[in-house]
Image (spheres, rainbow, N blue to C red):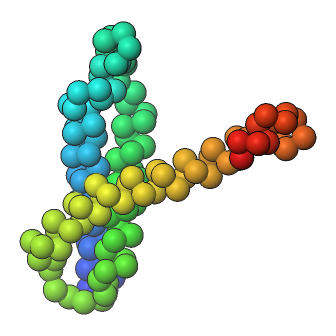
Amino acid sequence: MSAAIAHAFELLLWGGCLGAFGQFLRAVVGVVKPGGPLSSPTTGAREPFRASQFYFTLFVGFIAGSAAVVLSNDLTNQTALSVTAKLCLVAAGYAGTDFIEGITGRFAASSAKPPMASRGRANLLRD
């Protein structure tokens, strides 16, 4: 493997790991804040931790960080990432995951709607 390919792969891994770390910070903030998933506002009971959802959201953070590296850096450039670039990748994982999940949630919500003929007149007025 050539040095340029190895460096590009290293940058993608750095971006992915830092993006996943940014998403991890976002998840911790969401869990700890009042009204987060560990406390229900209506009953006060704690909801169960869903590991599969947590790992999936970390994976989405990895993808967001890797995409940020691809969009912002020439992968053949042989320089190392600066501290500022690393912090930006953490921020890309933090904010990019919200963007990606919002886009996928919008497509999932639109595909879950029943066909127009079976929705009824009242639902048609709200669309």
As displayed, is residue 121 above or below residue 12?
A: above
Q: Position of residue 36 (x, y in %)?
A: 30, 29
Q: Is residue 25 left or right of residue 59?
A: left
From the image, which quarter does the N terminus lie in? Answer: bottom left
Q: Is residue 6 visible?
A: no
| Furthest residue toward left | 83
Q: Quadrant of residue 116?
A: top right
Residue at horizontal 26%, vertical 72%? Answer: 10
Where residue 14 appears, x then y in whole percent?
24, 66
Residue 61, image x and y in percent? Answer: 35, 54
Residue depicted at x 43% and y 34%: 52
Q: Is residue 49 above or below residue 56?
A: above
Within the image, what quadrant is residue 56 found in? top left
Q: Is residue 104 left or right of residue 124?
A: left
The picture places residue 53, in percent across and down from the top left corner, at 42, 36
Quadrant location of residue 77? bottom left
